[in-house]
Amino acid sequence: MKKESYLYRFFGHLSTITKHKFEVTKLCFKSGLIKQGILHDLSKYSPIEFFSGVKYFQGYRSPIDAEKEDKGYSLAWLHHKGRNKHHYEYWIDKDYEKLNNLALEMPLNYLLEAACDKIAASKIYNKKNYTDSSPYNFLVNGKDQIFMGKENARRHMHLLKYLKDNGEEKALKYYKSLYKKWKKDKKFNI
């Protein structure tokens, strides 16, 4: 891999995270998640996340993956997931009696933000190859569903499959209707 200049990586990373934030904000707004759209991923602009992103910027995948490959861990990711509730990892705790991880159920508003996040990330990294199936395929072909807990995985899959089967416009209307119902009684069945 060719080592790009610092300025190239700086502005490339800044451009990528800003495009991603803008896309998630649009999707969240259309889903009724106004406050979450505004606040989405602001921690990416913090020094620990931003400068790690610059160092490991490649433009076609998350710099977090490159940092993990280089160091075996990512301090930027540990910082990020601990501050952004739309990541299922935020909801993982230890079950010391059973000596395993405990996946807490994610509230619907964060599941919806997670769906918007996956859609936006798929658009940014897949560019012209993006389809409404891309976020679903990423989840199905990845390992996240193993760790996020059975119910969280099922709900994530449901939201992204709805996008795959019905297109973005209908999916966002569906997400908004789910959010409106959830706001009334904090219960949902999907």
Image: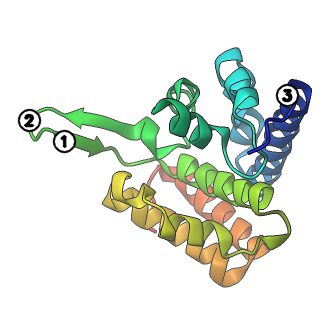
Q: Residues within 10 Å of mark 2 (few under 14, many from 20)?
A: few
The residue type indicated by label 2 comes to Glu
Query: Which disc is residue 97 wearing?
Result: 2
Residue 159 appears in which quarter of the rendering?
Answer: bottom right
Image location (x, y in percent) of residue 81:
52, 33
Quarter containing the N terminus: top right
Q: Residue at x 69, y 82 (%)?
A: 166
Residue with the most extreme bottom position: 165
Q: Which residue is tagged 1?
A: 100
Q: What crowding class fits label 3: few (fewer than 14 Cα within 10 Å), some (14-19), or many (20 or more)?
A: some
Point 69% across, 50% down: residue:
61
Point out the residue furthest to the top here.
47
- The residue located at (45%, 33%) in the rendering is 72
Q: Does residue 2 appear to the left or right of 118 in the view shown?
A: right
Q: Is residue 92 above or below residue 132?
A: above
Q: Nearer the viewer, residue 106 or 84?
A: 84
Give the CA distance from mark 2 to mark 1. Answer: 8 Å
* Res. 85 visible in picture: no
Residue type at the position of mark 3: Phe
Q: Which mark is residue 10?
A: 3
